[in-house]
Amino acid sequence: MKEICEEQLKRKRIQNYMWIFFPIIVIGGLKWPYLGYGVLAIMIIFIILALSKGRQWCGWLCPRGSFLERVFVKVSLNRKAPSFLKEGFLRWAIFVGLLGFMVFRLIKTGGNPVKIGAVFILMCAISSVVAFALGLIFKPRTWCSFCPMGTLQGLLGPNKNMVFVSDACIDCGACAKVCPIGTSPADFKDAGRVASIDCLRCRECVAKCPLGALNC
């Protein structure tokens, strides 16, 4: 348990550095569109890392996720998000819609490097507006529960760094309260592991479980 608590402190420190890149890229990108290539680089790196770490990098390193969890949390109502936000139809509608819009905008650039960078800034800005709206009303990282990039990471590494649920779990709800996106590991007790592509591998639930029923 001591190791888990130390890991959570490490995660917090990392996020407190990572969130700084979010306003730099989004706000700075409005004047210097080339910063949009930073967004592209993050997307590529996270996709590659997901093959071995699942969504752990989404839970630890994502600049926007870190901003929502460490800064935006101060103004969030922190309510549980409605379950339909995680349903497959909505998730894939958003995935296909945003991907299609991005491809359309990239084609419209005609290969202009400045305009290409601006496309990635635009995509980040649009999704951030939605993330802020949802994060204000519900949990700060509600957007992350169906974020297209997060979904892709989850699909690429579904069995990496999983949280396991033992029979000692009594479904007290402590884990769901601390989960950044409101996932309840207790719902996966029968499976013995959190078999969900939504899990951010943040280990907050493991650290806060009063019975030590969760492990990784």
Image: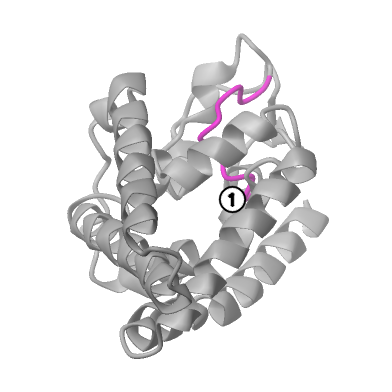
In this rendering, does residue 141 appear at all?
Answer: no
Give the residue drawn at x 80%, y 42%. Answer: 52
Element class at badge 1: helix
In the image, 135: left or right of 71?
A: left
Chief secondary structure of the magenta span?
Answer: loop
Give the residue drawn at x 62%, y 51%. Answer: 202
Residue 199 % position (x, y): 56, 37
Does residue 200 belong to the magenta stretch?
yes
Residue 207 % position (x, y): 65, 50
Quickly name the residue at label 1: 204
Residue 89 % position (x, y): 30, 21
Does residue 209 belong to the magenta stretch?
no
Q: What stretch is highlighted in magenta?
A: 193-202
Q: In which quarter of the image is residue 136?
A: bottom left
Residue 210 % position (x, y): 60, 41
Residue situated in front as seen by the camera: 101 or 11: 101
